[in-house]
Amino acid sequence: MSKFKMSYFVSNNYQVMKLRMVCPLLSTKSESLLWNFNILRKQHNEPCRNKKKICKIPILTTDTMQEEISKLGDGDRGNIMEQAKQIMKNIAKGKKTSFCSVIEADNDDMHAAGTTPITFLRQVLVLCMYPSLLEDSRFSEDAKCRAKCILSSIKGSSLGTCPHHLGLPLIREQIAEFISKRDSGVKSDPNNLILHNSTHDAIKNTLKLFARTIEGKPTGVLLPIPHPPIYSALLSELGLYELGYQLNEKKNWTFNKKQLEKSLAEAQCHSVPRVIVAVNPGNPTGQVFSRQNVTEIIKFAHKEKLFILADEIYQENVYSETSEFYSFKKVKHELGPPFDKMELASFISASKGIYGECGLSGCCVEFDEIDECVREQIKRSQSNLLGPNMVSQVVLSCMAQPPTEENDSFELYLREKCCILTGLMQKAKLVSDRLNAIPGITIVPIEGGLSGYGKIELPKLAIDDANSKKLDPSELWCKTMLEKTGIRFTPGTAFGQIPDSYYFKISFVEPFETLENIMDAIKQNHLAFIKSFKKK
């Protein structure tokens, strides 16, 4: 029966003869079965005219699902993204526009913008995925050596093996060595590291540890304004209370102690503040905290008994000659007692930096100086989950231990790294200089990260028009730019804004020519936007 095509299953003698020709063993009994099959098929295809329509009542609805998830929304960022998708659909259908595609100028996905992957990383990944190529002369010897080392540490020597729930011990040791070297000898213990598939998973699983009410109040989490939208979404999903504290824009988006104290005082009646989040280098602001700034945050957290979550995934993206990355772990240990014993969770990832492996991702969280019983409970919790996929772990291995001078791949790796970082540094300067030259737009010089946070000066008529449309003025500006130019920016409402101020996020991972065109389009259309409201 498996040889028969469905088209043969029709009730007429000619088709049955064709079936016999294909399969001489077809018996009269088989023909009868075929006939019955066709009758049933016809009955199934006929509309049920005499049957009453059964109304399906869904079991899971937005009213019966988890309350925190049902409240989640895309916000202004989602509205802009949906508008951009609709424009692309219209273009595909032949609708005429002044542009042929949408440029995602708010997306810091380096590979989507055309960045070439680091060769060593991709070679190791290919060799781990297909070990037969270990004898291929096209691959460098150190890439082969790394692949063999990783495979030999896995049962069955295959990436298809179920992963360790905390991450491969070998790779955790490599990352611990990387952190110790980064922090000038401040020791990192592999047992304090947990690997995850993505930064999102790492942050979520860490915040989940605080999702508990105390004295009838939810845990309060202090978030910088502005901050990555992922934090607000996760706090809402986990039932944690968001406490915003404004960074000081006039001082390069640095820590603002007065704002923190104000936010903390206002939150006491609504929550029990237990966590402070610091993003360094900043997203979307592009600032790099000085050592003094990191010290101030640590001392404030100590005074207020706050657990520090240090989002440091952009740590390799530092461009300003006057800036340097200081990890929270290094600074708190160098401060000595009592600060060196403070609890800290910090994140590193291969999704940013010079690698930009958002699709392969991989993230490591390090828990420093946490209670031993808590550490064991976290490990037990992770043991109930399938560990991070092997591909992401290979990526983290290459990030933690890149080629060194004695390796075949070193020269190429160094050229690729310098090319990527130099290009990003020049693009950051281009965006800062060009935006600050446009009347009505300012941006704090970008020191690190992969994006900047532009500020827009808007006339009162534009603000009134936005309010009448139930839009934030920053969203109206972004929507207008998208409609006129096909360039997508994210409005400041997605990240948090200073009251009565309006912003937009712009990344600088696109090629130079594209960035120049974006700057030209911003200048032309921003001035036209302002002029259109001055006429009214």
Image (cartoon, rainbow, N blue to C red):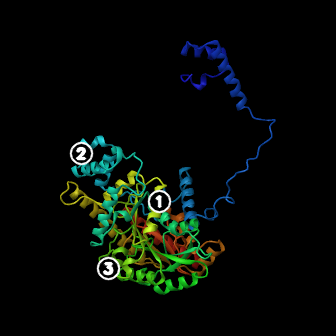
User: Which residue is labeled 3 in the image?
Assistant: 334
Which residue sits furthest left? 406
Q: Amino acid at mark 1?
A: Arg
Q: Which mark is residue 68?
A: none
Secondary element at tag 1: helix
Is residue 191 depicted above or below 264 in this figure?
Answer: above
Residue 265: in sight, yes or no? yes
Q: CA distance from mark 3 to mark 2?
A: 46 Å
User: Which residue is labeled 1 in the image?
Assistant: 380
Is residue 94 depicted above or below 363 in this figure?
Answer: above
User: Which residue is labeled 2 in the image?
Assistant: 138
In which image quadrant can residue 185 be found? Answer: bottom left
At horizontal 41% and vertical 51% (from top left) the residue drawn is 163
In which image quadrant can residue 436 be found? Answer: bottom left
In which image quadrant can residue 220 be found? Answer: bottom right
Left or right relative to 253: residue 236: right
- State the image coordinates of residue 228 (x, y, percent, origin top left): 48, 69
Q: Amino acid at mark 2?
A: Arg
Is residue 135 depicted above or below 526 in this figure?
Answer: above
Disc 2, disc 1: CB below 8 Å? no
Q: CA distance from mark 2 to mark 1?
A: 43 Å
